[in-house]
Image: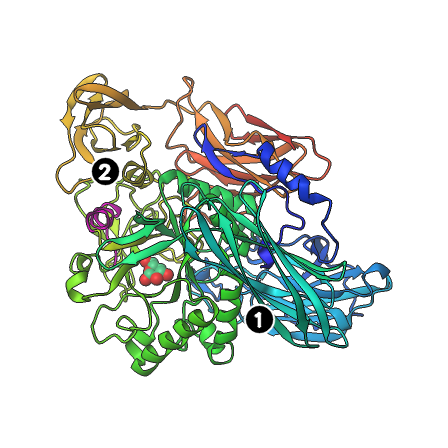
Amino acid sequence: MMGHQNIFMEKRKHYMPIFGNRLILLVTTVVLICNAAIAGVEGQSRRVLNFNAGWSFRLDAETDYKNSTADYSDWRNLDLPHDWSIEMPFDSLSPGRSGTAYLPGGVGWYKKAFALSDADRQKRLYIVFGGIYENSEIWINDVYLGHRPNGYVPIVYDLTDHVYKNGVSNVITVKVNNSQQPNSRFYTGSGIYRDVKLVFTEDVAIAYNGSFITTPLINEDEATVHASFEITNYALREQGNITVETRIHDPEGCIVARKVTPEIFTKKQKVTVVEQEIEVPSPQLWSTDRPVLYRAVTVLRKGKRELDRYETVFGIRSFVFDVKNGFSINGQPMKIRGVCLHSDLGALGMAFNRSAAIRQLQIMKDMGVNGIRTSHNPAASEFLDLCDEMGFIVMNETFDVWKHHKNPFDYHLYWDAWHERDFADHIKRDRNHPSLFVWCLGNEAQEQWHDPGLGESIPRRLAAIVDSLDGTRPTTIASNEMSLDNPVLMSTAVDLIGYNYNHGKWPTFPEDHPGRKFIVTESTSALASRGQYDLVPIDTMRIWPTRWDIPFDGGNSDKSISAYDHVHTPWGSTHEESLRLFEAYPHISGMYVWTGFDYLGEPTPYTWPARSSYFGIVDLAGFPKDVYYLYQSVWTDKDVLHLLPHWNWHQGDTVDVVAYYNNADEVELFVNGISKGRKTKEKNKLHVRWRVPYQAGSLTAVAYQDGIEMRRATRQTAGEAVRLVIKNREDTLDVGNHELAFLEVVAVDLEGNEVPCFNDWVEVETKVGGTVVATDNGNPTDGTSFQSLKRKAYNGKLLVVVKGNKGDDKIAVMAHAKGLRSGIRQLVVE
Ligand code: GAL
């Protein structure tokens, strides 16, 4: 598992939310002592180098730069991961259209020169790209390494026989061709957008992604760990007498089990598989609440010489999907309360950044989410590492299309030649992740309707690939055609029947599909702009668009969507409706809501200038919409009392006021201290509502349990904005680990109340150290580039993403707006 080799990794981090949203790093003394005990024996048999820094880049569809002698001295210098599309202006004529957020693709070239020392003369050398979108072609010096159409799977090439190892410069050239558009229904980005690594090994070593660890037997006293390793031998002759030793480190870092397999014989140019069974005493079980991780460190030796040292992170947990009772983990029933997430990181585009992904996942965790569906393609392997560490039930997906297309240039072009290889590579990359529970073989495939033969055979073939390479996890397919004639839905090759939408049919699933297990692969698709409220009675439901195949010409003139949870697509539902149904039926093992975050592309129901989605429970900038608190009130034990809308209206307006709450039996509303009555949730409702005439002043909700006040929430009418305030979750920034700070700019009035309708231009700058890498405001129609330092706030908020630079010890960020006192915030660099 390349993603799981911690050669350069700092001590493992365990993230726990404390003090609200703050993440802390827990490193116990025990970890240090246990790790210290093994530190002295680590060898240099395998090295993994982060290869992200110091690339040259040029966007150019006209010229061929594949030769190592091509002059690239005037190209732009950058560090990877990189997404060039996100840097471009939004363009209504962009060939990817709304699907890819009106951001263009094109042809990009990357080059990097590097020299290897004499010490590496005897080593084998591999380069591993985490993901290149798309159609990459790669040369080392002047040797062509290959072409890979798929933009999401890892790409590995063996450089050993093509590099100079005597200090002479090597040049690697990568051509990325994302010019054939449209090729996706959602934003893909363009370029080398995930980590690149160089891996040095001996001739005899464990293959790339060549370990597979399962835990077939688990009880309180011990767990049986089954480990299998693919050992490659590139030496000139067979190699005998090799010893394979695996040590298991428990979550505290202590060695708790060990196995030695002696006398392994490896034939030259062949793969030898070694299997080990190891008993781990008193296993600590991985769960979403306590995601504890074990590490298997496997050492290959010949005599005293270490040939390889390979680390696999894994977890010990058992789980069951049941026809009647849904999902349970480690013997405990648990509903999978999930969200679908695309891979983009909002204003950062597809360029993977660990701290941005942590922020996304932590926001989800705080809402009560315990599951992520990586729709509809492989996520970064580092993202799966985070799901392991933070505790999520991952539904892993490889394809949005099979052989039949959804777009003229999408993956269907490569299906025949590549899908088996791509799928296998994805499975082998991810199969050790304890957070991975379900393989989703496809999403709303056209074969549901257009090709019954393939609709039957493709699920069978894909499920067989999962069985042969994994075999420990169930499969499902996300289907949206409920007809019993749909061969994909009815496929007996998969373990769980997966419904996209069709919530009306969830209750009768047991009768419709007797004996089958059920999961909601995708639900809801409700729509909202954060902080936007249309003053209509909120029980007026709006179905936008009216039909999926009829262009939409209605809606609000500014292309906003009211956030009262009363707008949804014709195939979807309100959040409340699907949430209520999901919670009511034990046979529904899980539900993945479309979507946790807004994403780039698919600005349903609008088109240009709208360029990103309205589906998110959280907006593109990472600011929660109101329904976030609806889920939090149902999915967590935290005390919730959330009041909407804001309280800045016009005298005479009639306003629907809604409260989401839990841990209380009734809520009373006060306008300027005058009670508007107590309400309790009606049967089948997850909110309470009042309709009141607006009066400037205060709007207060008080929650009671048995008549005793438990908590209160207030919305104050804000006056004129007088100054900007910059808020942030963290006061420190870890520059070495490319951490980003996500700062929130708000405008406040004289009394310090946040001004909810503040939509003016804000300009941001770094005064000391640091660089602003992106700004955003969560408005799906904002046409300002994400790189711009000047952007309008949207409904009172603006996001500023800042990175630290080498040598910074402090960073100061300022925000300015016309007529307002500027805001400033300092960060200490770690
Ligand atoms: C689903 C599809 C998703 C997204 C969503 C929008 O049918 O699987 O990718 O397009 O609709 O509602």
Q: Residue at image x 41%, y 64%?
A: 185
The magenta stretch spans residue 582: yes
Rendered position, 477 above or below 90:
below
Q: Is residue 467 left or right of residue 164?
A: left
Q: Is residue 191 left or right of residue 559?
A: right
Give coordinates of residue 672: x percent, y percent.
23, 18
The residue identified by callout 1 is 135
- Can residue 83 be spotted in the picture? no
- Ligand 1, by image quadrant, is bottom left
The magenta stretch spans residue 461: no
Give coordinates of residue 384: x percent, y percent.
50, 53
- Say which mark, if any, is on residue 763: none
369 vs 651, nearest the viewer: 369
Callout 2 amino acid? Leu
Picture quarter with the C terminus: top right
Highlighted magenta segment, given as a residue range:
571-585
For label 1, the crowd category at 10 Å Cα-Cα, with few meaning under 14, some 14 to 19 and many 20 or more, is some
Rendered position, 752 above or below 142:
above
- Say which mark, if any, is on residue 535: 2
